[in-house]
Image (spheres, rainbow, N blue to C red):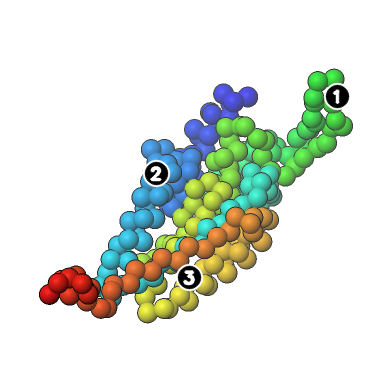
């Protein structure tokens, strides 16, 4: 089955490439987690080093059971909007729906259930289908960006003069988009990092004038 999945992926990837999020760093050829970290740090540090200083706010989001939340009807619409033909779209939807599942441990076996949500774990296609299903929400301006690595997302706001409206609006829009797409945010792993560089406004003390120096 994995051989067939690789053939499908090889055919699917170039078709949907123009629709993929350029700031999704997972499951893409020749890029990875190091590129995601470097990109985030480069933009953040460049802003912090500007004259007058500034603030960087980063909101980290994590999805709960990300691959299990893929909705085949929504994904089918996104596949067709990305230029995937009806036959390949239908094959992918059949691959994702009406999947029998059961659990076996030693001599015991659970009842079989049929699942039509999510993607099979440990498969070749599941990670790419998830990144494709989240590719329609993107944002990248000079002062704010959304970047992703698989099921982890970070909204980075480069704040000047305490004007964080774009950052706050993007955060709210992203949360609403997650709700519409049945993506469950893990509140316990949602964290915000605020970085502020402040230059010292006072001259450092002259060590030669400390009491007891003998002068």
**51 shown above or below 100:** below
Residue drawn 48% across the image and 70% down it: 167
Residue picked out by circle 3: 167
Residue drawn 52% across the image and 54% down it: 153
Q: Where is residue 193 in the image (x, y as percent from the top left)?
A: 48, 62
In the figure, is residue 119 to the left or right of 102? left
In the figure, is residue 10 to the left or right of 67? left
Q: Where is residue 141 in the image (x, y as percent from the top left)?
A: 39, 66
Element carrying mark 3:
helix
**11 shown above or below 192:** above
Element carrying mark 1:
strand
Residue picked out by circle 2: 34
Residue drawn 67% across the image and 35% down it: 120
In the figure, is residue 38 to the left or right of 7? left
The quarter of the displayed image where residue 45 is located: bottom left
Element carrying mark 2:
helix
The quarter of the displayed image where residue 99 is located: top right
Q: Compare residues 158 and 120 and report the one nearer the observer.
A: 158
Tell me if mark 1 has few (under 14), some (14-19) or many (20+) residues whose alpha carbon lies within 10 angstroms of its own.
Answer: few
**161 shown above or below 92:** below
Q: How many angstroms separate mark 3 from mark 2 (CA)?
A: 24 Å
């Amino acid at each position: 089955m994995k051989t067939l999945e690789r053939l499908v992926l090889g055919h699917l990837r170039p078709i949907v490439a123009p629709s993929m999020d350029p700031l999704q760093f997972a499951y893409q050829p020749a890029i990875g987690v190091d590129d995601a970290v470097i990109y985030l740090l480069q933009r953040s540090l460049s802003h912090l080093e500007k004259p007058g200083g500034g603030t960087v706010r980063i909101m980290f989001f994590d999805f709960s059971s990300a691959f299990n939340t893929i909705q085949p009807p929504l994904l089918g619409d996104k596949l067709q909007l990305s230029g995937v033909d009806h036959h390949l779209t239908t094959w992918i939807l059949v691959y994702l729906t009406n999947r029998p599942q059961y659990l076996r441990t030693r001599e015991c076996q659970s009842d079989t259930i049929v699942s039509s949500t999510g993607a099979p774990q440990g498969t070749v296609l599941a990670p790419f289908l998830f990144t494709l299903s989240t590719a329609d929400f993107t944002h990248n301006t000079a002062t704010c960006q959304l970047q992703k690595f698989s099921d982890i997302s970070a909204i980075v706001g480069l704040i000047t003069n305490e004007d964080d409206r774009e950052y706050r609006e993007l955060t709210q829009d992203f949360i609403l988009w997650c709700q519409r797409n049945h993506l469950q945010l893990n509140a316990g792993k949602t964290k915000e990092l605020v970085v502020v560089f402040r230059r010292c406004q006072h001259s450092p003390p002259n060590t030669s004038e400390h009491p007891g120096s003998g002068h």
